[in-house]
Image (tube, coloured by chain):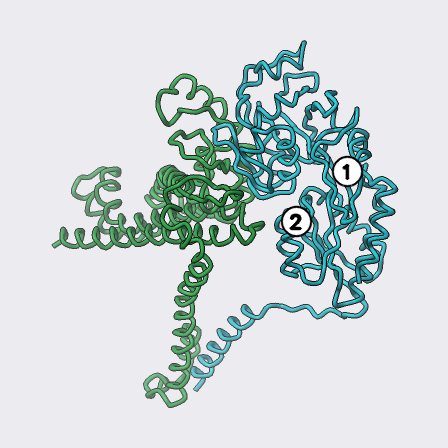
Amino acid sequence: MSTTLPNAANRPDESVISTPPSKFDIVIDRGFRGLTGFFAWSTVSLVFFIVYEVGGKAMPAIKTHGLSFLTTQTWDLQNEQFGVLPEIWGTLYSSILALMIGGFFGISIAIFLTQDFLPRKVEWVFKNIVELLAAIPSVVYGLWGIFVVIPTLRPSAIWLHENLGWIPFFGTSLSGPGMLPAALVLAIMVLPTVSAISRDSLSNVPGKLKEAAVGLGATRWEAIFGVILPTAAKGIFGALVLGFGRALGETMALAMLVGNSNQMSISLFSPGNTLAALLANHFPEAGEKEEPVLMYAALVLLGITLLVNICGAFVLSHTTRRAAGGQK
Amino acid sequence: MQTRWYRLIASFALVAAVATGCSSSQSTGDGAANVKLQGSGASFPAPLYGRWFKEYSGATDGVKVDYQAKGSGGGIKDFIEHTVDFAASDAAMNDEEIAQVDVGVVLLPMTAGSVVLAYNLPELDKPLQLSREAYTGIFLGQVSSWDDESIAKTNEGVQLPSLPITVVRRADSSGTTFVFTNHISEISDDFRSGPGVGKSVNWPESDKFIAAPKNDGVTATIKQTPGAIGYIEFGFAEQAKLPMASLENKSGNFVAPSLENAKAALAAVEMPDDLRAWLPDPAGENAYPIVSYTWLLCYQKYEDPSKADALKDLVRWCLTEGQKSSAEMGYVPLPPNVVETITAKLENIQ
C-alpha cells in the first residue's frame, strides 16, 4: 500500500492518519486477509492433491511391485518387469555432479560480484548475464549439449579413458550421450539459481563486519573466507539445496543428453538414465500397463525431492542453532 | 478518505489479476462452416502428413487439420480415449486395442516407408553391406567392433576402423521400433526370445547402447557420434545425409534402401480384408527387407457428420493428390490396387 503514502503526505491536514479504522476499513482488511489466506492454503492443498492423485494412480503398481521396484533394474514392458534402481542412481549421481560443478562456479561468481572486484555498472551487467542463463529453455540446452558439449568433451574423454582407464570414473569410453555431458549442462542450468541466491545472502552481510575484520588486520581474502562466507553460509546452503532440487527435476535436457540407458555405472562417460527422463520418454505413449508404474516412478522422484528438502531444512536449522550458540 | 479507496482498488486489482490469470481464453469458433480435424500419432510419417495436411487445408476452405506427432503408441491411446478425430500408427492396432473402441475402427494404410540402418563412419567411401548375421549381431550386442569378422566378410576391400560400435535406439515407445524389431525377430530366433517384438523392447544392457527420443533424436545422435549405428526412417536419414547400410534380404541379395526397392517389397504383399498387412521379411530379388505400411486410424461412426465427410474427403485427397508428393519426401507411394481397396473401405466411415 505504499502508493497511498505520497497522497497522504500531500494532504494539508494529516488528521486522516490518526482516525481509527472505520468498519469499512476493517471489512476490506479482513476480506483481503481472507483472500490471501485462501490462495496460500489452496497452494498448500494443491501439493497434497497432487500427491494424492499420483499416489492413487500409482497404487496398482505399488501393490504388484512393492519395494522391489526400488531395488531391481529391468524395465521390460513385454514381461511386465519394472525396476527403477538405475534411474534413482542416475538422478542422484547426475544431480550431485551438477551441484558440485555448478555450486563451485555459482558461489565463485557470487563472491566475485559482491566483494567489490568490479565497478558497479560492470557488476550489474555481469549479474544480469548470469541470471539470463535461467531464461534459456531446457531444449536449447539439450541441443547445445548434443552439438557443442559432447564433441568438445570427446577428445579429452578418449584420452582419459585410454590413459587413466583404471580409475573407475573413467572406466568406459564415451559413446556420446552420457553422465558427464548431462551433468555439465545441468551444472550450467543450476548455476543462475545458486549464484543469485548466494549473491543475495553475501550482499546482506553487514558491511561493518568486513570493516571490522579488515580493521583487525585481515587481508581481503581472509575477510572473505574467515568472516563473510561463514556469515552468509546459511543462505549459500539454502541456494545449494534449491539448486539440487532444480537438478533433480530437470527433464528435457537430460532426456536428450544422458543416453537413457537402463544401467548403473560409476563411470562418468557411460550412459545412464534419470527418473525425470524416464517419465518424459515413456509417459506420452504409456498404455494401461505402464501408466501406474510410471506414476510410481513419479512418486519416487517426488519422495527424493522431498527428502532432499527436508534434509536441507534440518541441516540449515542445525547449523543456525550452532552459529547462534557460537556467537553468545 | 482517499486511502481506503486506494486500498479497495488495490485489492480489487489483485483479485482481477488473479481471475484473469485463471480463466482460460476460450476461442469461440463459428461451428457449422468450420471443420477442425484433430489427429495425433506416429512420428514416422509425420513429415509427409505435415505437408499433406497443410496443402489440403490450404486448398480446402473451412477445413483445418491439426496433426501432433507424438508417436504411434500415443496416437492409439488418444484414439481409444476419443480425444482426437483420427490417429496414426505404424503398428496399426492390435485386436485388443480395437476392441476398446465401441464405435468401430477403420484402419487405412496411407503410405509406406523403409526403416534404414544409418551409421556414422566418415572414413568409409563405399556404403556398408550388412549380412543378416551382422546386423542381428550388432543389435543383440554380440558384434561390438566395426572390424568384426561378420562385418568384414561382406565388405571386401573396405578398410573398416577398429572402433567400438555404438548402437542408438529409441528411448520412447515407437512404431519405428515395432517395425524394426518385427523384422529382426522374424530372421533371428535369439532376438525373438530376447528383446522380442514391440513398440518398446528390453534392449541389451551395455555402455554402447544409447537411447534417444524420437526419430530426429536418434538421427542427431548418430550424426554426432563416430562409430554409431541406429534404425531410423528413410526420409530422416536422407534429410540428414547419413549413409545407410545395404541389407541382405530374403533372397540373399544386398539391397540398398531406395524407393524402388521398397516398392519391390510391397509388391509381394497381399492386402487382407482388414488392411492390416505385415511385411516382416518380404520376398523378392530386390525387395528391401524392412518396409512397413503406416496407418491412419479412423472411427467407423462420427457424431458430427460434417467431420466424417471432411475426413473422407481428406483421405481421398491424400490417396490421389497426396501420393504424388510421397516419393519426394522419401515415402513409398501406394500401389494403384491398394489405393482402390482403401477407397472402397472409406465408405465404411459414417
Question: Residue B179 has which mark?
Answer: none
Q: Is residue A118 visible?
A: no
Chain under numbered label 2: B
Residue B266, image quadrant: top right
User: At 41% from the left edge and 88% from the top edge, which residue is drawn?
Assistant: A24
Q: Is residue A239 above or below residue A4?
A: above
Q: Nearer the viewer, residue B167 or B76?
A: B76
- Residue that extends furthest to the top in the rendered view of this protein: B157
Which circle's residue, 2 or 1, is located before the other in the chain? 2
Q: Is residue B132 above or below residue A120?
A: above
**Left or right, residue B57 beside residue A112:** right
Question: Residue B94 has which mark?
Answer: 2
Residue A87, image quadrant: top left
| Chain drawn in cyan | B
Give the structural element (helix, strand or loop) at label 1.
loop
User: At 50% from the left edge and 48% from the top edge, which residue is drawn?
Assistant: A279
Disc 2 versus disc 1: distance between alpha carbons?
A: 24 Å
User: At 44% from the left edge and 79% from the top edge, which residue is drawn?
Assistant: B7
Q: How many marks?
A: 2
Q: Is residue B179 visible?
A: yes
**Left or right, residue B221 beside residue B264:** left
Q: Is residue B8 above or below residue B349?
A: below
Picture coordinates of residue B176, whole percent (x, y): 65, 39
- Residue that extends furthest to the left in the rendered view of this protein: A328
Query: Which quarter of the figure is the N terminus of chain B placed in?
Result: bottom left
Chain under numbered label 1: B
Write down the residue under mark 1: B331
Colour assignment, chain A: green
Picture coordinates of residue B214, whole percent (x, y): 61, 41
**Left or right, residue A150 beside residue A211:** right
Give the structural element (helix, strand or loop) at label 2.
loop
Picture coordinates of residue A222, whole percent (x, y): 22, 38
